[in-house]
Amino acid sequence: MTRNYRSDRIGNLQQSEIRAMTRECVRLGGLNLGQGICPLPSPPEILEAASEAILADKSTYSKFEGVDDLRTTIAKKMASYNKLEVNADTDVIVTIGSTGSFVCTLQGLFNPGDEIIIFEPFYGYHVNALRVSGCEANFVTLTPPDWSFTREAIEAAITPKTRGILVNTPGNPSGKVFSRAELETIASICQEHDLIAITDEIYEYLVYDGHVHTSLATLPGMWERTVTMSGFSKTFAITGWRLGYTVAPAHLATPIGFINDLFYICAPTPLQYGLAAGMARLSPDYYTEMSDRYRQKRDYFCDALISAGLTPHIPQGAYYILADVSHLGFSDDKKAAMHILETTGVASVPGSSFFASDTGRSLTRFCVAQEWEVVKEAAERIATL
């Protein structure tokens, strides 16, 4: 056959280095600290409640915006944790993960040719989803070690076609937690240039060392122009359930909901009921204890990286660690990551996967969302480099 059966919209997409390194890890029988699949035990309260919902045969379509119980639960959580009062009936949509939230946001609020500002290092799925939608990414590079930015850098990235800005806090892969002062700068720019803000807050409970998670939508003048995306995959180690949500004012939530209905019909109904019931059974201490466990794993693995001469950029949140691998003497990050895997049996992800610029070519990303014994063994292996 001579005809090209690939659509133009995926012409510039490449297979994720995350999945490529996972395959190499499997081939070599290594420890996978590359992909953030989060193979940890899920809370029994969540699992039991989901099992009850399945056995109760709650198997039909739900409303496209989600079952009432879960949307009410999300609204209560937004009020108590995010300090944002929302209407469960008009402002909350349950989606197929936070990724589904982003896809529906792009399709519902933006047109092909629109530009969206993205900070790098970025989450690759954000950039690929944006490109498939026909939108363009305008990158603003964050400066290590604290992954800072300037107002001038954002202003320089804005053109007449720019319609939005994406903020991932806490960030994947940097672990950056945007401070209130930084968010105020972004808010000011959004209002001055009439931009829609999209925030990915999937790691919102994982913040360390006195840093505080702040939702951009809570800042003055931002509720009416902000789409807040989050989910349950990381918080409850249920990445395969694919349950996320969008919170936005009705004039933004309505078109997002239209697309959610068109693409997905609804999120898995019994899992929605189970999650709502299970969250009500959880102790409030669950969230702080979970965050503390991840902080301990972060510290333990960072100590091993330092021992190996790989300088870690200590993350303020999430469960990823970017490490400087230039000490190993390789010409690029992919060779360095393969050397680490072949030498120690520990898989990471080349840093260039998260940058449009060359900034990531001296970095590699490790994920510590693993059982303690895996993190400890990986640390022991890394320390031998």
Image (cartoon, rainbow, N blue to C red):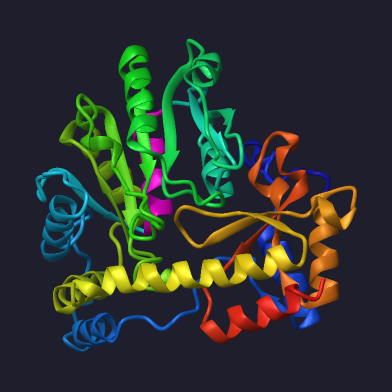
Q: Is residue 241 visible?
A: no
Q: Position of residue 229 (x, y in %)?
A: 33, 47
**Quarter of the C terminus within the rendering:** bottom right
Q: Position of residue 257 (x, y in %)?
A: 26, 44
Q: Is residue 189 visible?
A: yes
Q: Position of residue 37 (x, y in %)?
A: 53, 70
Q: Would residue 82 appear left or right of 133 to someone viewing this image?
A: left
**98 part of magenta stretch:** yes
Q: Would residue 46 appear left or right of 347 to someone viewing this image?
A: left
Camera-nearest residue between 129 and 34: 34
Camera-nearest residue between 141 and 193: 141
Q: Quadrant of residue 234?
A: bottom left
Q: Main secondary structure of the magenta part?
A: helix
Above/below status of 372 relative to 269: below
Above/below status of 201 relative to 180: below
Above/below status of 254 relative to 280: above
Residue segment shown in magenta: 97-110
Q: Would residue 62 appear left or right of 236 to someone viewing this image?
A: left
**206 part of magenta stretch:** no
The residue that appears at 32% across and 27% down in the rendered structure is 184
The residue that appears at 80% across and 80% down in the rendered structure is 28
